[in-house]
Image: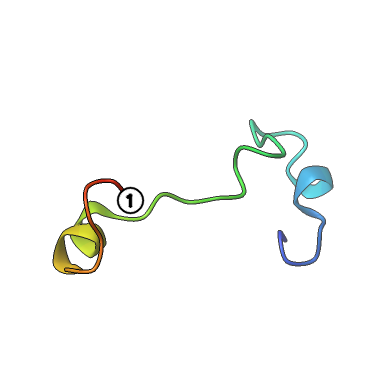
Amino acid sequence: MLRWGIAATELAETSFQVGKNELWPIPDAEISSNASVGTED
């Protein structure tokens, strides 16, 4: 839905917020297993 730009209208009845809910956090396991990612990233 995000790709098509219809998330805001399709999820209007939920707690979806434009500008906040489009991004997902990177899992800690992925950050920890990647030596190229430092603590400042």
> Percent from the top left, x then y, of residue 19?
68, 39
**In this figure, which residue is indicated by the disc labeled 1?**
41
The colour scheme of the drawn protein is rainbow
Where residue 33 sits, quadrant-wise, is bottom left
Q: Nearer the viewer, residue 1 or 24?
A: 24
37 vs 21: above or below = below
Q: Residue at x 29, y 55 (%)?
A: 27
The location of residue 36, given as percent across then percent down, is: 23, 68
Q: Is residue 11 left or right of residue 20?
A: right
> Which amino acid does the dot numbered 1 rest on?
Asp
Q: Residue at x 66, y 37 (%)?
A: 16
Q: Position of residue 12 (x, y in %)?
A: 78, 37
Frontmost residue, 16 versus 19: 19
27 vs 15: above or below? below
Horizontal side, residue 22 vs residue 3: left or right: left
Element type at marker 1? loop
Q: Nearer the viewer, residue 10 or 27?
A: 27
Query: In the picture shown, does residue 1 fall above or below 15?
Result: below
Crowd around label 1: few <14 · some 14–19 · many ≥20 (10 Å): few
**Is 18 positioned to the left or the right of 34 in the image?**
right
Q: Position of residue 1 (x, y in %)?
A: 72, 61
Which residue appears at 59% of the width and 42% of the height? 21
